[in-house]
Image (cartoon, rainbow, N blue to C red):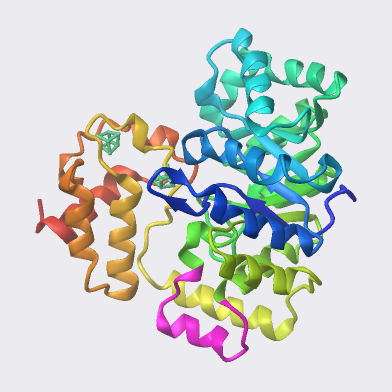
Amino acid sequence: MFPEIRKKLGFGMMRLPTGDDGVDFEALKPLVDHFIAHGFNYFDTAKGYHNGQSETAVKLCVAQRYPREKFLLTDKLSHNFFKTEADIRPLFERQLADCGVEYFDFYLCHAITRGTWGQYIDCRALDILRELKAEGKIRHIGLSFHDMPEFLEEILAAHPEIEAVQLQINYVDYDDAGVRGRGNLEVAKKYGKPVMVMEPVKGGVLTRLPDEARAVFDRLGGSTASYAIRYAASFPEVTCVLSGMGTMEMVRDNVSYMEDFKPLDRTERAAVERVREILKARDDIPCTACRYCTPVCPRDIPIPDLFNDYNLKKAYDGWNSSFYYGVHTRDHGKASDCLLCGACERECPQHIPIRDHLKEVAKQFEGGK
Ligand code: SF4
Ligand code: SF4
């Protein structure tokens, strides 16, 4: 474990407050201040978040305003920002400069799947990260992982230099065949690797529960997000749970129950199980809105937006889903424009059969095309 991570909640810098020009740095500063004032110290960014503005937000809102020992920072080596071995070091140095720091506490190979890992191996990424660690520019090397437990085991067995693993854990997907949260957590535990959790609220889905599910938590008190985040944090091998926080209301809520964290008790676990049953009974598409699929689509189909419209329609019978389907497809491709090329599915960390689902989406919103 990493004792330097003082509390089990991390500030995910991927859903920050925004305005007309992108991230609203002035709006973010008080959120950061509240978080740090209550003893939290872990921040997580990546070059691709907010089109590069997340790293700038780290510099302007955290690094330039707090002494370095007051915060821990995780950044990532993302496969879409390097092509060759020679690209990695300059990219890394640029990330340090963009964040305004001299070193990263954690530096992760980002969004690893069988499809992306070969690029890291071919480019000797781990050798370079080990060199950077020896130079004092990385404290700990890690991995953010989106594939099956068998593959995680292959990697951890071959690369003992990986010290931590970032995994998707949420109470809906924990046993899901496409995500395998439980299996991956068990592999991390077997190899003694502390776990950081991403997507505890499933890209926000678990904060927007249908009435029947919300009522289960309402009877206990506490926000819908609180049960999702505490669920993930209750696993002993979990060191830190990331939450993307875009408003002061979210920061205050998260801080209120994570400052003095207590694992879910038996009654709360039963409530979570009931909510999981309610949600699983609904025919939704398990998209986390990571948007890895959209840049590769030749028809410019806004896949996660259309899936969200579909999920809202199904889960909430949302009266305005059709309206938003029109908004989302006004300047972009529609579900029925899909060429069935499959490029999107190769990028999807959730292994979603996107083409099949787009046919359902077209049927729902375009009248059976
Ligand atoms: S399969 Fe369809 S949605 Fe996926 S990349 Fe190809 S055209 Fe786009
Ligand atoms: S379909 Fe897959 S890759 Fe695309 S946004 Fe959803 S989870 Fe991400």
The reply to whether residue 150 is in sight is: no
Q: Is residue 266 left or right of residue 365?
A: right
Q: Position of residue 177 (x, y in %)?
A: 52, 53
Quarter where residue 242 is shown: bottom right
Answer with left or right where residue 263 lies relative to residue 285.
right
Farthest residue toward the top? Answer: 86
From the top left corner, tell me how far across and down residue 18 is, in percent. Answer: 45, 51
Q: Which image quarter has ligand 2?
A: top left
Rendered residue at 88%/48% (across/down): 4
Image-quadrant location for residue 236: bottom right
Q: Is residue 200 magenta?
A: no
Residue 34 position within the rendered picture, expressed as x and y whole percent measured from the top left: 70, 63
- Magenta extent: 207-223
Between residues 25 and 340, which one lies in front from this camera angle? Answer: 25
The residue drawn where x is 36% and y is 45% is: 353
* Residue 218 on the magenta segment: yes
**Foreground pick, 232 / 207:** 207
Q: Above or below — where is 189 with respect to 278?
A: above
**Residue depicted at x 87% and y 47%:** 2
User: Closest to the observer: 102 or 343?
Assistant: 102
**How many numbered marks appear?**
0
Residue lying at the far bottom of the rendered structure: 219
Name the spot of residue 96 as percent of width and height, x first: 69, 27
Q: Is residue 179 visible?
A: yes
Relative to 295, say whether 283 is above or below: below
Residue beneath the point at 66% across and 38% down? 59
Q: Taking 79 as reference, is 260 left or right?
A: right
